[in-house]
Amino acid sequence: MAGETIPPWFAKAPPLPPSTGEVIRVATADELLAAVDRAGPGGTILLADGHYKVPRVVVLAGKKNITIRSASGDPTKVILSGKGWDVGNDRDDIIHVARCDGVTIADLTFTDCRSYGIKVEAENAPKEVHIYNCRFRDIGVRAIKGSAGQDPNVHAVKGSVRYCQFENTKVPPTNWLYGGDYIAAIDMMALEDWTFSDNAFRNIKGRNGGGRAAIFLWVRSRQVVVERNLIVDCDRGVSFGNPGQSTANTQGALPPYVSDGIIRNNFIAGGADCGIELWYADRIKVVHNTIWRPERNWARGIRVGKGTAHTDIVNNLVHGEIRLEGGESQLRNNLAGRLEGYFVDAASGNLALTSAATKAIDQGASLPEVTDDIRRRARTGTRIKSKEF
Protein backbone atom coordinates (compact mmCIF):
# COMPACT_ATOMS: atom_id res chain seq x y z
CA MET A 1 0.00 0.00 0.00
CA ALA A 2 3.05 2.25 0.14
CA GLY A 3 2.36 5.39 -1.86
CA GLU A 4 -1.31 4.64 -2.48
CA THR A 5 -4.40 4.96 -0.33
CA ILE A 6 -6.29 2.03 -1.85
CA PRO A 7 -4.31 -1.08 -2.87
CA PRO A 8 -5.37 -3.11 -5.91
CA TRP A 9 -7.13 -5.81 -3.89
CA PHE A 10 -9.48 -3.40 -2.06
CA ALA A 11 -13.07 -2.79 -3.22
CA LYS A 12 -13.68 -0.03 -5.77
CA ALA A 13 -16.80 2.12 -5.91
CA PRO A 14 -19.46 1.07 -8.41
CA PRO A 15 -20.45 4.06 -10.60
CA LEU A 16 -23.57 5.93 -9.64
CA PRO A 17 -26.50 5.89 -12.08
CA PRO A 18 -26.90 8.84 -14.48
CA SER A 19 -28.33 12.06 -13.09
CA THR A 20 -32.08 12.65 -13.31
CA GLY A 21 -34.23 15.71 -12.79
CA GLU A 22 -32.88 19.23 -13.17
CA VAL A 23 -29.15 19.27 -13.98
CA ILE A 24 -27.01 22.35 -13.42
CA ARG A 25 -23.54 22.23 -14.92
CA VAL A 26 -20.78 24.35 -13.37
CA ALA A 27 -17.13 24.97 -14.12
CA THR A 28 -16.00 27.54 -11.52
CA ALA A 29 -16.26 28.02 -7.75
CA ASP A 30 -18.57 31.01 -8.17
CA GLU A 31 -20.86 29.00 -10.45
CA LEU A 32 -20.92 26.23 -7.85
CA LEU A 33 -22.00 28.63 -5.10
CA ALA A 34 -24.73 30.11 -7.30
CA ALA A 35 -25.95 26.65 -8.33
CA VAL A 36 -26.30 25.55 -4.71
CA ASP A 37 -28.43 28.59 -3.96
CA ARG A 38 -30.83 27.96 -6.88
CA ALA A 39 -30.97 24.15 -7.08
CA GLY A 40 -34.47 22.83 -6.46
CA PRO A 41 -35.75 19.50 -5.12
CA GLY A 42 -34.36 16.53 -7.01
CA GLY A 43 -31.70 18.64 -8.71
CA THR A 44 -28.15 17.64 -9.56
CA ILE A 45 -25.12 19.90 -9.74
CA LEU A 46 -22.48 18.48 -12.07
CA LEU A 47 -18.96 19.81 -11.71
CA ALA A 48 -16.71 19.90 -14.77
CA ASP A 49 -13.13 18.73 -14.35
CA GLY A 50 -10.99 21.34 -12.65
CA HIS A 51 -9.87 22.93 -9.40
CA TYR A 52 -12.51 24.80 -7.39
CA LYS A 53 -10.97 26.96 -4.67
CA VAL A 54 -14.08 28.02 -2.77
CA PRO A 55 -14.03 31.62 -1.48
CA ARG A 56 -16.49 30.77 1.30
CA VAL A 57 -18.24 27.75 2.75
CA VAL A 58 -20.68 25.99 0.42
CA VAL A 59 -23.83 25.80 2.59
CA LEU A 60 -26.61 23.30 1.88
CA ALA A 61 -29.65 24.34 3.93
CA GLY A 62 -33.31 23.51 3.34
CA LYS A 63 -32.48 21.32 0.35
CA LYS A 64 -34.38 18.17 -0.60
CA ASN A 65 -32.91 15.32 -2.65
CA ILE A 66 -30.01 17.32 -4.04
CA THR A 67 -26.84 15.81 -5.52
CA ILE A 68 -23.42 17.39 -5.97
CA ARG A 69 -21.07 15.25 -8.05
CA SER A 70 -18.39 15.36 -10.73
CA ALA A 71 -19.58 15.16 -14.32
CA SER A 72 -16.87 12.63 -15.17
CA GLY A 73 -17.44 10.40 -12.14
CA ASP A 74 -13.69 10.55 -11.45
CA PRO A 75 -12.90 12.19 -8.09
CA THR A 76 -9.28 12.83 -9.07
CA LYS A 77 -10.41 15.27 -11.77
CA VAL A 78 -12.61 17.56 -9.64
CA ILE A 79 -10.84 19.15 -6.70
CA LEU A 80 -12.43 21.39 -4.06
CA SER A 81 -10.04 23.23 -1.77
CA GLY A 82 -10.23 25.79 0.99
CA LYS A 83 -7.84 28.54 1.97
CA GLY A 84 -5.11 26.06 2.89
CA TRP A 85 -3.76 23.80 5.65
CA ASP A 86 -1.08 26.35 6.55
CA VAL A 87 -3.41 29.37 6.59
CA GLY A 88 -4.34 30.31 10.14
CA ASN A 89 -8.11 30.27 9.60
CA ASP A 90 -9.84 27.85 11.96
CA ARG A 91 -13.16 28.36 10.11
CA ASP A 92 -11.78 27.20 6.79
CA ASP A 93 -14.43 24.62 5.83
CA ILE A 94 -15.53 23.54 2.36
CA ILE A 95 -19.14 22.21 2.62
CA HIS A 96 -21.77 22.41 5.39
CA VAL A 97 -24.96 20.28 5.39
CA ALA A 98 -27.72 21.61 7.65
CA ARG A 99 -31.52 21.37 7.39
CA CYS A 100 -31.69 19.00 4.43
CA ASP A 101 -33.60 15.86 3.52
CA GLY A 102 -31.64 13.94 0.95
CA VAL A 103 -28.08 15.03 0.06
CA THR A 104 -25.58 13.05 -2.01
CA ILE A 105 -22.00 14.28 -2.36
CA ALA A 106 -20.08 12.04 -4.75
CA ASP A 107 -17.00 11.63 -6.92
CA LEU A 108 -15.14 14.71 -5.62
CA THR A 109 -11.77 15.43 -4.00
CA PHE A 110 -11.57 17.67 -0.92
CA THR A 111 -8.16 18.99 -0.04
CA ASP A 112 -6.02 21.68 1.54
CA CYS A 113 -8.26 23.30 4.12
CA ARG A 114 -7.50 24.10 7.74
CA SER A 115 -10.66 22.86 9.41
CA TYR A 116 -13.45 20.68 7.92
CA GLY A 117 -13.88 19.17 4.48
CA ILE A 118 -17.58 18.35 5.00
CA LYS A 119 -19.54 19.30 8.11
CA VAL A 120 -22.85 17.55 8.85
CA GLU A 121 -24.83 19.57 11.38
CA ALA A 122 -26.81 17.05 13.43
CA GLU A 123 -28.20 19.92 15.52
CA ASN A 124 -30.20 20.87 12.40
CA ALA A 125 -31.64 17.35 11.93
CA PRO A 126 -30.49 16.48 8.41
CA LYS A 127 -31.72 13.22 6.88
CA GLU A 128 -30.32 10.92 4.22
CA VAL A 129 -26.86 12.46 3.86
CA HIS A 130 -24.65 10.24 1.73
CA ILE A 131 -20.97 10.82 0.96
CA TYR A 132 -19.79 8.49 -1.80
CA ASN A 133 -16.50 7.86 -3.61
CA CYS A 134 -14.89 11.07 -2.42
CA ARG A 135 -11.24 11.69 -1.63
CA PHE A 136 -10.01 13.69 1.33
CA ARG A 137 -6.37 14.74 1.43
CA ASP A 138 -4.56 17.05 3.83
CA ILE A 139 -7.56 18.33 5.77
CA GLY A 140 -6.24 20.00 8.91
CA VAL A 141 -8.79 19.08 11.61
CA ARG A 142 -11.56 16.79 10.35
CA ALA A 143 -12.16 15.50 6.83
CA ILE A 144 -15.79 14.85 7.82
CA LYS A 145 -17.14 16.51 10.96
CA GLY A 146 -20.52 15.82 12.54
CA SER A 147 -21.52 18.49 15.04
CA ALA A 148 -24.38 18.26 17.57
CA GLY A 149 -26.50 20.42 19.81
CA GLN A 150 -27.70 19.61 23.31
CA ASP A 151 -31.23 18.45 22.44
CA PRO A 152 -31.14 14.67 22.99
CA ASN A 153 -33.99 14.12 20.52
CA VAL A 154 -32.28 15.67 17.48
CA HIS A 155 -30.04 13.52 15.28
CA ALA A 156 -28.63 13.26 11.81
CA VAL A 157 -30.70 10.34 10.54
CA LYS A 158 -30.00 7.67 7.89
CA GLY A 159 -26.68 8.58 6.35
CA SER A 160 -23.55 6.94 5.01
CA VAL A 161 -19.90 7.38 4.10
CA ARG A 162 -18.93 4.77 1.50
CA TYR A 163 -16.01 4.07 -0.84
CA CYS A 164 -14.12 7.17 0.25
CA GLN A 165 -10.36 7.67 0.64
CA PHE A 166 -8.71 9.62 3.42
CA GLU A 167 -5.01 10.43 3.46
CA ASN A 168 -2.75 13.07 4.96
CA THR A 169 0.79 13.87 3.95
CA LYS A 170 1.23 16.38 6.80
CA VAL A 171 0.85 16.45 10.57
CA PRO A 172 -0.40 19.49 12.51
CA PRO A 173 2.19 21.80 14.08
CA THR A 174 2.64 22.01 17.83
CA ASN A 175 0.75 25.30 18.10
CA TRP A 176 -2.52 23.67 17.00
CA LEU A 177 -4.93 22.30 19.61
CA TYR A 178 -3.62 19.63 21.98
CA GLY A 179 -0.06 20.15 20.82
CA GLY A 180 -0.92 19.12 17.27
CA ASP A 181 -2.94 16.01 18.15
CA TYR A 182 -6.43 17.41 17.45
CA ILE A 183 -6.99 15.67 14.13
CA ALA A 184 -9.15 12.85 12.75
CA ALA A 185 -10.59 11.68 9.46
CA ILE A 186 -14.22 11.19 10.57
CA ASP A 187 -15.47 12.64 13.88
CA MET A 188 -19.26 12.63 14.14
CA MET A 189 -21.90 13.00 16.86
CA ALA A 190 -25.64 12.46 17.29
CA LEU A 191 -26.02 9.96 14.46
CA GLU A 192 -28.91 7.56 13.99
CA ASP A 193 -28.82 4.72 11.46
CA TRP A 194 -25.54 5.50 9.68
CA THR A 195 -23.15 3.23 7.79
CA PHE A 196 -19.40 3.69 7.24
CA SER A 197 -18.23 1.07 4.79
CA ASP A 198 -15.55 0.24 2.22
CA ASN A 199 -13.42 3.29 3.01
CA ALA A 200 -9.63 3.50 3.11
CA PHE A 201 -7.62 5.62 5.57
CA ARG A 202 -3.91 6.30 5.59
CA ASN A 203 -1.60 8.45 7.73
CA ILE A 204 -4.21 10.27 9.84
CA LYS A 205 -1.76 11.29 12.55
CA GLY A 206 -1.24 13.86 15.26
CA ARG A 207 2.05 15.51 16.01
CA ASN A 208 2.69 13.28 19.04
CA GLY A 209 0.82 10.11 18.05
CA GLY A 210 -2.31 11.12 19.95
CA GLY A 211 -4.64 11.92 17.08
CA ARG A 212 -8.30 10.90 17.23
CA ALA A 213 -9.46 7.82 15.37
CA ALA A 214 -9.83 7.42 11.64
CA ILE A 215 -13.51 6.75 12.46
CA PHE A 216 -14.53 8.40 15.74
CA LEU A 217 -18.25 8.27 16.63
CA TRP A 218 -19.75 9.55 19.90
CA VAL A 219 -22.30 11.70 21.74
CA ARG A 220 -25.79 10.16 21.46
CA SER A 221 -25.03 8.08 18.38
CA ARG A 222 -26.99 4.87 17.82
CA GLN A 223 -27.57 2.15 15.25
CA VAL A 224 -24.25 2.69 13.48
CA VAL A 225 -22.38 0.18 11.32
CA VAL A 226 -18.64 0.36 10.61
CA GLU A 227 -17.62 -2.36 8.17
CA ARG A 228 -15.09 -3.40 5.54
CA ASN A 229 -12.80 -0.41 6.09
CA LEU A 230 -9.03 -0.44 5.59
CA ILE A 231 -7.12 1.67 8.11
CA VAL A 232 -3.33 1.92 7.86
CA ASP A 233 -0.85 3.94 9.91
CA CYS A 234 -3.45 6.10 11.65
CA ASP A 235 -2.94 6.94 15.33
CA ARG A 236 -6.21 5.20 16.18
CA GLY A 237 -8.43 2.98 14.05
CA VAL A 238 -12.07 2.96 15.19
CA SER A 239 -13.36 4.63 18.36
CA PHE A 240 -16.87 4.39 19.71
CA GLY A 241 -16.98 6.96 22.49
CA ASN A 242 -14.36 8.94 24.34
CA PRO A 243 -13.13 8.88 27.95
CA GLY A 244 -13.69 12.64 28.14
CA GLN A 245 -16.75 14.87 28.18
CA SER A 246 -18.37 16.82 25.36
CA THR A 247 -19.93 20.27 25.35
CA ALA A 248 -22.73 18.72 23.25
CA ASN A 249 -23.98 16.91 26.35
CA THR A 250 -26.21 18.80 28.74
CA GLN A 251 -24.78 19.19 32.22
CA GLY A 252 -25.18 15.98 34.15
CA ALA A 253 -26.25 13.95 31.12
CA LEU A 254 -24.99 10.42 31.25
CA PRO A 255 -23.58 8.43 28.33
CA PRO A 256 -23.62 5.95 26.54
CA TYR A 257 -21.95 7.80 23.75
CA VAL A 258 -22.73 5.04 21.22
CA SER A 259 -25.37 2.33 21.46
CA ASP A 260 -26.59 -0.53 19.26
CA GLY A 261 -23.64 -0.49 16.90
CA ILE A 262 -21.48 -3.00 15.09
CA ILE A 263 -17.80 -2.91 14.04
CA ARG A 264 -17.10 -5.78 11.64
CA ASN A 265 -14.79 -6.99 8.88
CA ASN A 266 -12.26 -4.15 9.18
CA PHE A 267 -8.51 -4.38 8.55
CA ILE A 268 -6.52 -2.10 10.88
CA ALA A 269 -2.72 -2.02 10.67
CA GLY A 270 -0.09 0.11 12.34
CA GLY A 271 -0.68 3.31 14.26
CA ALA A 272 0.75 4.89 17.37
CA ASP A 273 -2.11 4.26 19.80
CA CYS A 274 -4.96 1.75 19.36
CA GLY A 275 -6.81 -0.45 16.87
CA ILE A 276 -10.38 -0.38 18.24
CA GLU A 277 -11.54 1.30 21.44
CA LEU A 278 -14.88 1.57 23.24
CA TRP A 279 -15.73 4.14 25.91
CA TYR A 280 -19.22 4.58 27.37
CA ALA A 281 -20.60 2.29 24.68
CA ASP A 282 -23.59 -0.01 25.10
CA ARG A 283 -24.83 -3.01 23.11
CA ILE A 284 -21.93 -3.02 20.67
CA LYS A 285 -20.71 -5.98 18.59
CA VAL A 286 -17.03 -6.08 17.60
CA VAL A 287 -16.75 -9.05 15.25
CA HIS A 288 -14.44 -10.46 12.57
CA ASN A 289 -11.94 -7.60 12.65
CA THR A 290 -8.26 -8.14 11.92
CA ILE A 291 -5.77 -5.89 13.72
CA TRP A 292 -2.01 -5.75 13.46
CA ARG A 293 -0.23 -3.63 16.05
CA PRO A 294 3.38 -2.48 15.74
CA GLU A 295 5.64 -2.58 18.79
CA ARG A 296 4.68 0.93 19.86
CA ASN A 297 1.69 0.39 22.16
CA TRP A 298 1.54 -3.21 20.94
CA ALA A 299 -0.91 -4.17 23.71
CA ARG A 300 -3.57 -1.74 22.50
CA GLY A 301 -5.28 -3.95 19.95
CA ILE A 302 -8.82 -3.67 21.31
CA ARG A 303 -9.54 -1.59 24.43
CA VAL A 304 -12.82 -1.83 26.34
CA GLY A 305 -12.88 1.29 28.47
CA LYS A 306 -14.95 2.73 31.26
CA GLY A 307 -18.72 2.85 30.89
CA THR A 308 -18.88 0.07 28.28
CA ALA A 309 -21.39 -2.75 28.82
CA HIS A 310 -23.47 -5.39 27.01
CA THR A 311 -20.75 -5.76 24.40
CA ASP A 312 -19.73 -8.83 22.40
CA ILE A 313 -16.19 -9.18 21.04
CA VAL A 314 -16.11 -12.27 18.82
CA ASN A 315 -13.96 -13.79 16.06
CA ASN A 316 -11.32 -11.07 16.02
CA LEU A 317 -7.69 -11.63 15.06
CA VAL A 318 -5.34 -9.32 16.94
CA HIS A 319 -1.58 -9.18 16.67
CA GLY A 320 -1.59 -7.42 20.02
CA GLU A 321 -3.93 -7.69 22.99
CA ILE A 322 -7.60 -7.33 23.87
CA ARG A 323 -7.82 -5.40 27.12
CA LEU A 324 -10.67 -4.72 29.52
CA GLU A 325 -9.88 -1.30 31.00
CA GLY A 326 -12.87 -0.61 33.21
CA GLY A 327 -15.53 -1.79 30.76
CA GLU A 328 -17.40 -5.08 30.43
CA SER A 329 -17.57 -7.40 27.45
CA GLN A 330 -18.21 -10.98 26.46
CA LEU A 331 -15.07 -12.30 24.75
CA ARG A 332 -15.49 -15.34 22.48
CA ASN A 333 -13.42 -17.06 19.81
CA ASN A 334 -10.83 -14.31 19.53
CA LEU A 335 -7.18 -14.97 18.77
CA ALA A 336 -4.75 -12.41 20.20
CA GLY A 337 -1.03 -12.35 20.85
CA ARG A 338 2.07 -12.70 18.71
CA LEU A 339 0.62 -13.76 15.36
CA GLU A 340 3.92 -13.73 13.50
CA GLY A 341 3.70 -14.87 9.88
CA TYR A 342 -0.09 -14.95 9.85
CA PHE A 343 -0.59 -12.11 7.36
CA VAL A 344 0.36 -11.60 3.72
CA ASP A 345 1.80 -8.09 4.22
CA ALA A 346 0.88 -6.69 7.61
CA ALA A 347 2.83 -3.44 7.41
CA SER A 348 0.96 -2.41 4.23
CA GLY A 349 -2.46 -3.39 5.58
CA ASN A 350 -2.93 -6.61 3.61
CA LEU A 351 -4.08 -8.78 6.51
CA ALA A 352 -5.17 -11.72 4.40
CA LEU A 353 -4.13 -14.96 6.06
CA THR A 354 -1.20 -17.08 5.00
CA SER A 355 -1.06 -20.84 5.29
CA ALA A 356 0.87 -20.33 8.56
CA ALA A 357 -2.29 -19.02 10.27
CA THR A 358 -3.28 -22.48 11.43
CA LYS A 359 -4.85 -21.30 14.71
CA ALA A 360 -7.14 -18.93 12.83
CA ILE A 361 -8.29 -20.73 9.69
CA ASP A 362 -11.66 -22.46 10.18
CA GLN A 363 -11.73 -21.57 13.89
CA GLY A 364 -14.37 -18.85 14.03
CA ALA A 365 -17.86 -19.15 15.44
CA SER A 366 -20.78 -18.81 13.03
CA LEU A 367 -22.43 -15.38 13.43
CA PRO A 368 -25.73 -14.44 11.75
CA GLU A 369 -24.73 -10.77 11.61
CA VAL A 370 -21.60 -11.50 9.54
CA THR A 371 -22.25 -13.41 6.33
CA ASP A 372 -19.35 -12.15 4.20
CA ASP A 373 -15.80 -10.83 4.62
CA ILE A 374 -13.94 -7.65 3.73
CA ARG A 375 -13.96 -8.72 0.06
CA ARG A 376 -17.70 -9.52 0.21
CA ARG A 377 -16.99 -13.22 -0.14
CA ALA A 378 -19.49 -15.46 1.62
CA ARG A 379 -18.39 -16.78 4.99
CA THR A 380 -19.09 -20.35 6.02
CA GLY A 381 -19.03 -19.74 9.74
CA THR A 382 -15.26 -19.33 9.83
CA ARG A 383 -12.64 -16.71 9.34
CA ILE A 384 -11.14 -15.87 5.96
CA LYS A 385 -9.56 -18.97 4.45
CA SER A 386 -7.78 -17.64 1.39
CA LYS A 387 -4.22 -16.45 1.67
CA GLU A 388 -4.35 -14.32 -1.45
CA PHE A 389 -6.35 -11.27 -2.54
Image (cartoon, grey):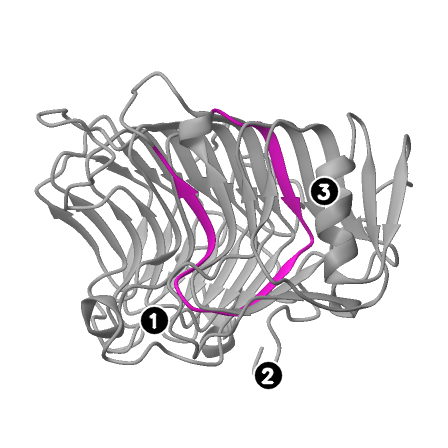
Q: Is residue 328 above or below residue 235?
A: above
What residue is shown with label 1?
271
Among the two numbered marks 3 and 2 on one chain, the one whose residue lies closer to the N terminus: 2
Query: Over which residues does the magenta segment extend?
Result: 125-148
Q: Residue at x 53, y 27 (%)?
A: 126
3 vs 1, front mark: 3
What residue is shown with label 3?
36
In this rendered view, identify the residue nearer to me: 351 or 306. Answer: 306
Q: Amino acid at mark 2?
A: Gly
Residue at the extreme bottom of the image, as rendered? 3
Give the side of residue 110 with respect to residue 176, left or right.
right
In this rendered view, identify the residue nearer to me: 182 or 228. Answer: 182
Give the side of residue 243 with respect to residue 59, left or right.
left
**Rendered location of residue 47, percent (x, y):** 82, 56
Disc 3 on helix, strand or loop? helix
Please give the count of numbered marks on the rendered protein: 3
What residue is shown with label 2?
3
